[in-house]
Amino acid sequence: MRLSELASLLGGRVVGEGDPEVNRVAPIETAGPGDVTFLANPRYFSYLETTRADAVLVMEGIEAPGKRLVQLANPYEAFGKAVEILMVRPLRRFGVHAHATVDPTAELAENVSVGPGARIGAGVRIGRNSVVEANVVVYDDVTIGDDCVVHAGCVLRDGVRLGNRVVLQPNVSVGGDGFGFAPGEDGFRKIPQVGGVVLEDDVEIGAGCTIDRGALDDTVIGKGTKLDNLVMIAHGVRIGSHNVIAAQTGIAGSTTVGNGCMFGGQVGVVGHLKIGNGVKLAAKTGVMTSLPDATEWGGAPAIPHRQWLRASGAYAKLPEIRRRVAALLRDRDE
């Protein structure tokens, strides 16, 4: 593809001479002829002079004499689009594989693919252009929308509902029983989990995530929310739209999360809390209380982010502080 064509698809403007053929996207440090790279982080500006890429995706207004640039409003987003245009292979379309098992009552819309070893239960509905890869198990009465991709090894329990353009990476479990046990005279009695799980449009779930069904009401993950690998969502959790939640985060039962939140890796949130809109949590934050809108937190238990940064900076100095305090106490006692 010619650079001018790619720039047009990305909504950018080429600055510099020539219109080379480009065929892949590469890191700015290692890119060479035929490659497009991008520059969105100021730490990498020094590479702009030395990169051998045929073109660099940059913010509007950035200049680099002698380099061929594509100026854009959002080069990081454009980078993602460029990868999709130049490098992403289209999904396989194989129809229903001979070694798949599809219940006669299941409804498969046009251009649906079901891979080998997959099992599609009774009353399942799968929308147009969706792909169910190998060894996926879809229990009864599951609904999968249009243009969804369910990768190998996923399990969707009964009553799970997926919107349109939902992506489940390998080995996701959706709709398992929530962790509900009531103490009694003879130990713990299991509480039946009869709610469902709803994943709204454009949700993406990372590999190995587990999303439990609600005890009575549904567990819900809102439109456009993205979960990284190995995230645990407990029963009855309701997550709003356009959130990003990094790996190994766990959210306990019946907690609600607003819209536009960002959770770092290994965040832990206890149950029955309310996390407001636009909340940002640093990695390893432990949330014990509800949090208001548009706030930033860190540490365990969570404290305001700036306070946590100061506390973290002081932590490394504690041995020296302890030594000085001990010396002061000795001087006082003498």
Image (cartoon, rainbow, N blue to C red):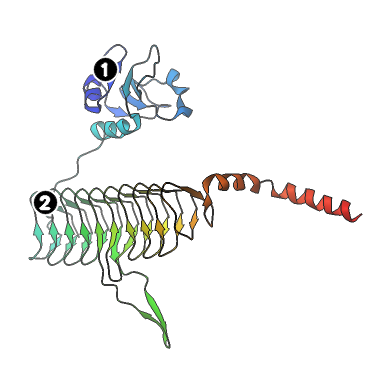
Q: Residues within 10 Å of mark 2 (few under 14, many from 20)?
A: some
On the image, the x and y values in percent for residue 75 come to 34, 29
Q: Earlier in the sequence, mark 1 or mark 2?
A: 1
Nearest the camera: 30 or 260?
A: 260
Question: Where does the image place residue 42, in percent across and percent down from the top left?
Answer: 46, 28
Occupied quadrant, residue 63: top left
Q: Amino acid at mark 2?
A: Gly
Tag 2 secondary structure: loop
Residue found at the very far front of the displayed protein? 292
Image coords of residue 261 (percent x, y): 38, 48
Up/down of 114 relative to 189, above or below: above
- Indicate the secondary structure of the residue bearing disc 1: loop
Horizontal placement of 38 versus 156: left or right?
Answer: right
Residue in view at x 30 percent, y 30 percent: 78
Locate the N terminus and report the quarter of the image it occupies.
Answer: top left
Image quadrant in which you'd find residue 38: top left
Examine the image and state in which quarter residue 52 appears. top left
Is residue 53 among what the camera can see? yes
Which residue is disc 2 drawn over?
95
Callout 1 amino acid = Pro
Q: Is 79 on the left or on the right of 136, as rendered?
A: right
Residue drawn where x is 60% and y is 44% of the image: 310
Residue at 89% over, 56% down: 333
Depth check, front residue: 315 or 276: 276
Indicate the position of residue 189 as horizontal and vertical percent values: 37, 81
In this view of the protein, can residue 282 be seen by the observer?
Answer: no
Tell me the residue that label 1 is attached to.
Answer: 20
Residue sitting at the far bottom: 185
Alpha carbon separation for disc pair 1 and 2: 39 Å
